[in-house]
Image (spheres, grey):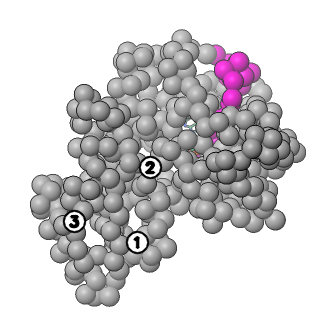
């Protein structure tokens, strides 16, 4: 299949943008697939109400079809057609966080094909804030089913070039626009229960949610890797975001972390295997000996690390890195909320993704 790559530059004039998005919308209406930018990660879109489109999405990604898709909408009024009930908590959360990086799980209406929800009687819905996503969804008829636009098992793409790498030849069109500003997938909250349950952590944290709706819970499988329960979000059971090299999280006193990582890198490099490091700005100058050292920004602004994490993992693959060591971001969870720009506690989402990518390999030093 030939994939049309439609570049949308930052200074592009509104008529050209309109024309490209109209073309993209038509493709979706005809049952085709289009990758599009959102503020979290790039999405791989198809018509959410067309079972054949959902089937194509699973095929293009190489994804198991029991893993349900998120339906992206552009207007609050459109929600009513695809869900059978709108709980009061959902209305409050939407007022606070939509459009934005929050996905909510509702009971589905009959309009939504079971192919889109992986056979579940619930449906995940998100209203993205990225202006191009919003316009594209409207042009596409209002209901765009979209997983992240990566091949199954690869890190979600936060830059268009990675969508091209994974999806060229597999889908009809790629909207090649700016990089995703958040860089991690949306927070998922189940609002079908009396107390909302977080199924996947993200930029919108438990504290932010609780400030709006009172008590919230977190699916036990997110923080307890030994839990024998199945995650409530089916997709969370897969080993995601895996780089080709072996990834290890190193946690402990900063000086011990630096010493351990430097020793490991020296050892592997001496044996002929390339090594990589993800470090924070505060410690970066102390790393030596690795083939590739990535700057995750300051510990005070974990948002910077979140934004770049998936790019780093993909770059390590390109650089043929065999062993990757990363500092832990666990303490970013407890960053005092008074600290400017860090009241998000996005450390929890970063650690959730890192632990999955590392297959839960953590060294305490
Ligand atoms: O930020 C995002 O959410 C991105 C952008 C493109 O919007 N999308 C995304 O989709 O991350 P995906 O398919 O990679 O992840 C969707 C997750 C999966 O873990 C899936 O199991 C879960 O949402 N999910 C979807 N529908 C669900 C449902 N009805 N109940 C529970 N979990 C659901
Ligand atoms: Mg994904």
Tell me the residue that label 2 is attached to.
Answer: 307
Camera-side residue of 6 and 184 = 6
Q: Residue at x 44, y 27 (%)?
A: 197
Residue 226, placed above or below residue 314: above
Q: Is residue 71 magenta?
A: yes
Q: In this view, does 63 lie to the left or right of 101?
A: right
Q: Which quarter of the picture shows residue 90?
A: top right
Tell me the residue that label 3 is attached to.
Answer: 285
In the picture, the quarter occupied by the C terminus is bottom left
Q: Which quarter of the picture shows residue 165?
A: bottom right
- Total tally of numbered discs in the picture: 3
Report the magenta residues as a range. Answer: 63-85
Disc 1 residue crowd, few under 14, some 14–19, many 20+, Cα 10 Å: some
In the picture, the quarter occupied by the N terminus is bottom right
Q: Is residue 357 magenta?
A: no
Residue 21 in view of the camera = no
Q: In this view, does 101 lie to the left or right of 274?
A: right
Tell me the residue that label 1 is attached to.
Answer: 245
Q: In this view, does 304 lie to the left or right of 8?
A: left
Element type at mark 1: loop
Element type at mark 3: loop
């Amino acid at each position: 299949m030939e994939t049309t790559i439609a570049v949308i530059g930052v200074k592009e004039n509104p008529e050209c943008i309109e024309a490209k998005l109209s073309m993209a919308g038509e493709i979706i209406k005809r049952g085709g697939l289009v990758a599009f930018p959102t503020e979290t990660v790039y999405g791989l879109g198809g018509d959410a109400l067309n079972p054949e489109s959902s089937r194509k999405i699973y095929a293009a990604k190489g994804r198991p079809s029991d893993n349900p898709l998120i339906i992206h909408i552009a207007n609050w009024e459109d929600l009513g057609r695809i869900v059978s009930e709108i709980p009061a908590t959902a209305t409050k959360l939407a007022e606070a966080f939509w459009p934005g990086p929050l996905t909510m799980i509702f009971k589905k209406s009959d309009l939504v094909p079971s192919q889109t929800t992986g056979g579940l009687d619930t449906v995940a819905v998100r209203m993205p804030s990225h202006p191009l996503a919003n316009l594209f969804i409207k042009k596409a008829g209002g209901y765009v089913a979209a997983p992240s636009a990566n091949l199954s098992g690869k890190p979600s793409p936060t830059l268009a070039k990675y969508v091209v790498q994974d999806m060229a030849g597999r889908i009809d069109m790629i909207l090649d626009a700016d990089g995703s500003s958040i860089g991690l997938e949306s927070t998922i909250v189940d609002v079908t229960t009396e107390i909302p349950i977080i199924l996947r952590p993200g930029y919108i944290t438990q504290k932010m949610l609780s400030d709006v709706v009172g008590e919230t819970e977190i699916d036990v499988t997110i923080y307890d890797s030994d839990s024998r329960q199945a995650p409530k979000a089916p997709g969370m059971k897969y080993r995601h975001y895996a780089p080709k090299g072996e990834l290890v999280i190193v946690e402990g006193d900063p000086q011990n972390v630096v010493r351990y990582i430097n020793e490991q890198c020296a050892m592997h490099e001496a044996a002929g295997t390339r090594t990589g490091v993800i470090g924070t700005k505060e410690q970066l100058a102390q790393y030596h000996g690795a083939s590739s050292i990535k700057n995750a920004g300051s510990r005070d602004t974990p948002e910077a690390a979140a934004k770049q994490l998936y790019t780093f993992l993909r770059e390590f693959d390109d650089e043929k890195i065999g062993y990757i060591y990363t500092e832990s971001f666990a303490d970013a969870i407890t960053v005092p909320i008074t600290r400017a720009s860090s009241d998000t506690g996005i450390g929890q989402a970063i650690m959730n993704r890192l632990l999955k990518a590392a297959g839960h390999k953590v060294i305490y030093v």
